[in-house]
Image: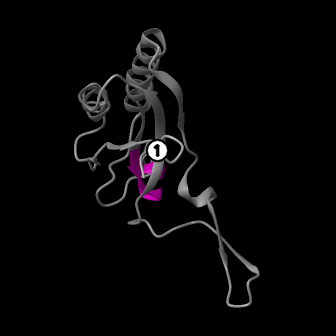
């Protein structure tokens, strides 16, 4: 079965990874960033080797996001970032093909153990089954 596994973050978290601290988002050192990337690279290599990885990507900071909605007249309304610092957004994802929910939960627990500086906010790793062409409705 296919699963989408997601991690969240805020604009403040991205700034912290660049060395700018704020409340709840301590500044990351270059060593902290390298440790995070090493952890995620090892995870991605393992998932690729096991055949479970379909795709996985980290996403650009929320300030580079664009919202498109429809106005009352039916015309598109476009709003660019940045967001307020407390709004959580999708920071990265993996699309996995795993034998069971238990297996993807094991992988999510490994993601949750990603190293980060003391005092950094911990976000849940979100798992959602991917619907199979309407068969899951």
Q: Is residue 70 left or right of residue 85?
A: right
Q: Is residue 106 left or right of residue 137?
A: left
Question: Where is residue 86 shown, x and y percent of the image?
Answer: 38, 66
Query: Is-magenta flag for residue 56?
Result: no
Q: Nearer the viewer, residue 23 or 84?
A: 84
Residue at x-position 23% and y-position 29%: 102
According to the picture, the residue beneath numbered tag 1 turns out to be 135
Residue at x-position 45% and y-position 42%: 130
Residue at x-position 34% and y-position 22%: 99
Q: Which quadrant of the figure has residue 87?
A: bottom left
81 in relation to 35, above or below: below
Question: Where is residue 40 shown, x and y percent of the image?
Answer: 42, 25
Residue at x-position 38% and y-position 53%: 21
63 in relation to 56, above or below: below
Question: Where is residue 92 shown, x and y percent of the image?
Answer: 48, 41
Q: Nearer the viewer, residue 58 or 35?
A: 58
Q: Which residues are magenta?
A: 7-15
Q: Which quadrant of the figure has residue 117?
A: top left
Farthest bottom residue in view:
72
Q: Nearer the viewer, residue 69 or 91?
A: 69
Element assignment for label 1: loop
Farthest front residue in view:
135
Picture quarter with the N terminus: top left
């Amino acid at each position: 079965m296919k699963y989408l596994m997601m991690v969240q973050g805020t604009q403040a978290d991205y700034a912290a990874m660049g060395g700018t601290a704020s409340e709840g988002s301590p500044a990351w050192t270059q060593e902290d960033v390298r440790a995070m990337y090493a952890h995620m690279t090892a995870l991605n290599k393992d998932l690729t080797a096991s055949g479970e990885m379909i795709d996985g990507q980290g996403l650009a900071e929320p300030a580079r996001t664009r919202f498109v909605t429809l106005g009352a007249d039916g015309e598109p309304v476009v709003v660019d970032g940045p967001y307020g610092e407390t709004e959580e957004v999708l920071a990265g994802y993996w699309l996995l093909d795993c034998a069971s929910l238990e297996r993807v939960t094991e992988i999510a627990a490994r993601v949750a153990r990603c190293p980060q500086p003391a005092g950094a906010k911990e976000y849940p790793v979100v798992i959602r089954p991917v619907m199979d062409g309407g068969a899951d409705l």
